[in-house]
Image: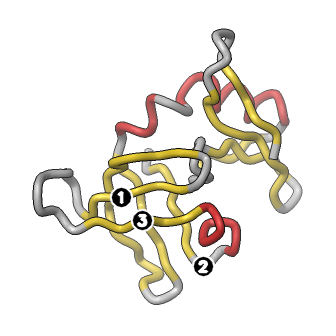
């Protein structure tokens, strides 16, 4: 994975090749979108990589292939903490997904939209 930074040095996400195309990936390793070229994937990362963290995402695990809607509570290059459901509030069920879980393919966190 190739890191993508804003002009001020802030990490926005990563670009990686995936099954013959390019993938724009968030700072924690969640899928932002697929692209036809490296340059297009980089544009996606720069334009929406950080803003997308405030959106709703889909958490898909081997045990639940339909997935569930989640909100990102905290994201870092090491993983992501998710609130299960449409809203994050005190007492909401949470789940931490490590970068290793995402890399293994056992868990996918994909941007909706």
Q: Which residue is drawn at 36% across and 41% down?
A: 55
Q: As drawn, which residue projects farthest toward the left?
A: 90
Q: In this view, does 87 lie to the left or right of 38?
A: left
Horizontal side of residue 81 vs 12, given as left or right: left
Pointer 2 or 1: first along the chain: 1
The residue under the point 68% across, 42% down is: 24
Give the alpha-carbon distance from disc 3 to disc 1, as whole Å.
Answer: 6 Å
Residue 103 on image: x %, y %: 69, 66
Q: Mark 2 points at which residue?
A: 106
Residue on which disc 1 sits: 82
Provide the secondary structure element on which disc 1 rests.
Answer: strand
Q: Which circle, 3 or 1, is nearer the viewer?
A: 3
For the C terminus, the quadrant is top left
- Residues marked 2 and 1 touching at CB (< 8 Å): no
Q: Earlier in the sequence, mark 3 or mark 2?
A: 3
Task: Name the mark on residue 96.
Answer: 3
- Give above or below for 9 relative to 60: above
Viewed as shown, does residue 65 lie left or right of 106?
Answer: left
* Identity of the residue drawn at 73% across and 35% down: 41
């Amino acid at each position: 994975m190739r890191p993508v930074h804003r002009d001020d040095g802030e990490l926005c996400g990563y670009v990686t090749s995936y099954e013959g195309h390019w993938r724009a990936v968030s700072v924690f390793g969640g899928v932002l979108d697929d692209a036809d070229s490296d340059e297009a994937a980089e544009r996606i990362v720069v334009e929406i990589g950080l803003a997308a963290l405030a959106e709703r995402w889909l958490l898909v695990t081997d045990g639940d292939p339909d997935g569930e809607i989640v909100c990102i509570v905290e994201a870092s290059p090491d993983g992501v903490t998710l609130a299960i459901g449409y809203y994050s509030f005190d007492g909401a069920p949470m789940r931490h997904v490590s970068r290793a879980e995402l890399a293994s393919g056992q868990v996918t966190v994909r941007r909706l939209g």
